[in-house]
Image (tube, rainbow, N blue to C red):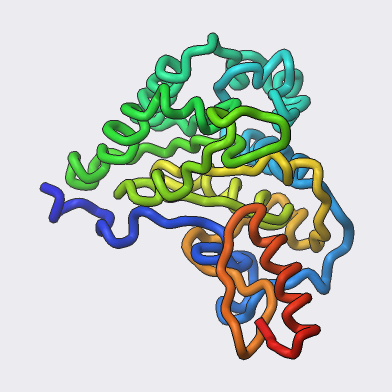
Amino acid sequence: MLGAARRQLGSGPMLGQVLRRLRPAAGASTEAARGYSSAAKEITVRDALNSALDEEMSADPSVFLMGEEVGEYQGAYKITKGLLDKYGPDRVLDTPITEAGFTGIGVGAAYQGLRPVIEFMTFNFSMQAIDHIINSAAKSNYMSAGQINVPIVFRGPNGAAAGVGAQHSQCYAAWFAHVPGLKVLAPYSSEDARGLLKAAIRDPDPVVFLENELLYGESFPVSDEVLDSSFALPIGKAKIEREGKDVTITAFSKMVGYALTGCRDTVQGRNQC
């Protein structure tokens, strides 16, 4: 049965950002590296994520949000700000503190053709729902010989932050990237956060979308193309932040910033990366 599945195993798990990041979808050359030279304004990663959710919910009535405090409180990190007022409680659902419960409901809704976006207040809490993610969402396409798609997004902050305990600081990128059937994205900039989240919501299969709490308030330049509601980034293309000839550094999520800083220091030492 697995051999007849629509998707090939080798194309399943992928880790976003530098190793697995994307190039522009709308009218851009697929060979050119992306840059920020044509940027028109700056927006925060938080606003980039919020606008992506808003536009995808507006464009597709099958998209809905579910999680702890995503509605009345507008999200623990305000990513869902304003969406309850705009779309109502049928599409922005506050849940009890039971990750296993609302994740299972989300997977079931995806089986029926809806497009749930499940928010974990922190990905550490996704461990409460790991069975639904690994054994239901990720495997259903293979086990059905490609007949069942599970268009669901699991999103929220991942990795260490300031002033939180060990059980709130873990990075699950490697865990999920080793699960056949899951696509794993970990954006860095506002452009990547906006374009990748839109792509994740439109994808026919489950996507784990790993954000970083420390990046939410950071601003990055974005172009008019990025701000267009049709903008999205195709999943599975690496991004070259800068070109050099001596050293290659790969990174994802917040570590991209540290890598770029290291590259600037290295250039001053006459090595290029």
User: Seen from this angle, which residue lies furthest left?
Assistant: 1
Q: Does 85 sit above or below residue 266? A: above
User: Seen from this angle, which residue lies furthest right?
Assistant: 41
Tally of numbered tags: 0
Q: Nearer the viewer, residue 162 or 78?
A: 162
Q: Which quarter of the image is occupied by the C terminus? A: bottom right
* Residue beneath the point at 26% across and 37% down: 140
* Residue beneath the point at 72% across and 36% down: 162
Across and down, in percent, residue 126 comes to: 46, 28
- Can residue 63 be seen here? The reply is no
Would residue 40 appear left or right of 242 to someone viewing this image? right
Across and down, in percent, residue 87 comes to: 68, 22
- Can residue 32 be seen here? The reply is yes
Across and down, in percent, residue 127 comes to: 42, 28
Tell me which corner region of the image, top left, top right, bottom left or bottom right, holds residue 159.
top right
Across and down, in percent, residue 262 comes to: 72, 70
* Residue beneath the point at 34% across and 54% down: 12
Q: Nearer the viewer, residue 239 or 81?
A: 239
Tell me which corner region of the image, top left, top right, bottom left or bottom right, holds residue 138.
top left
Q: Nearer the viewer, residue 123 or 239?
A: 123
* Residue beneath the point at 47% across and 63% down: 236
Q: Does 57 sit above or below residue 38? A: above
Would residue 175 appear left or right of 231 to someone viewing this image? left
Q: Does 111 sit above or below residue 91? A: below
Q: Nearer the viewer, residue 111 or 272?
A: 272
